[in-house]
Image: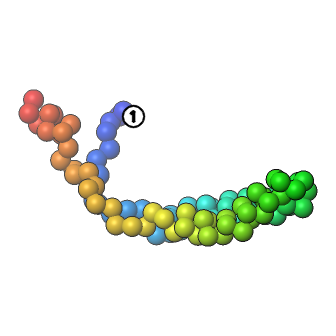
Amino acid sequence: MRGAPEHRITSAGLALSEEQVSRQRKYFISMMIRTACFILTIVLPSPYRWVALFGAVTLPYIAVVIANAGRENVTGNPSVYTEEVKSIEGS
């Protein structure tokens, strides 16, 4: 059944290995943007050069915060016994 709803039977999150791949990808993309900012600092004229330099200086902090976000404890995970299940059992 293609359209069958999937039910969550645990409150466990993603595997750590899957999550690390996602965080590494986010960090890599951020560092590539930082590299582009450094290159733009050399190429762009004066007012835009400072914006690119600001991005190149602040991106490492932002990249680390973004890459490390998401491993917090999530509360309020959906229960296995949802409203849809209740309506099926009530029928």
- Quadrant where the N terminus sits is top left
Q: Is residue 54 visible?
A: yes
Please state which of residues 73 and 7 is positioned toward the viewer in this rendering: 73
Which of the 4 image quarters holds residue 27?
bottom right
Q: Which residue is mark 1?
A: 2
Q: How many marks?
A: 1
Residue 62 versus residue 73: which sits nearer the camera? 62
> Which residue occupies 72% across, 68% down?
57
Q: Residue at x 73, y 58 (%)?
A: 33
Res. 15 in view: no
Q: Position of residue 44 (x, y in %)?
A: 88, 54
Please indicate whether residue 57 sits to the left or right of residue 72 in the image. right
> In percent of the image, x 80 and y 60: which residue is there?
50
Q: Is residue 56 left or right of residue 49?
A: left
Q: Residue furthest left?
A: 90
Q: Could you tell me which quadrant the C terminus lies in?
A: top left
Q: Nearer the viewer, residue 87 or 24?
A: 24
Residue 82, quarter of the rendered image? top left
- Rendering colour mode: rainbow
Establish if 64 lies above or below 2. below
Q: Amino acid at mark 1?
A: Arg
From the top left corner, tell me how far across and down residue 45 is, in percent.
90, 53
Report the residue at 82% width, 53% height from top.
48
Viewer-proximal residue among 70 and 50: 50
64 displayed left or right of 70? right
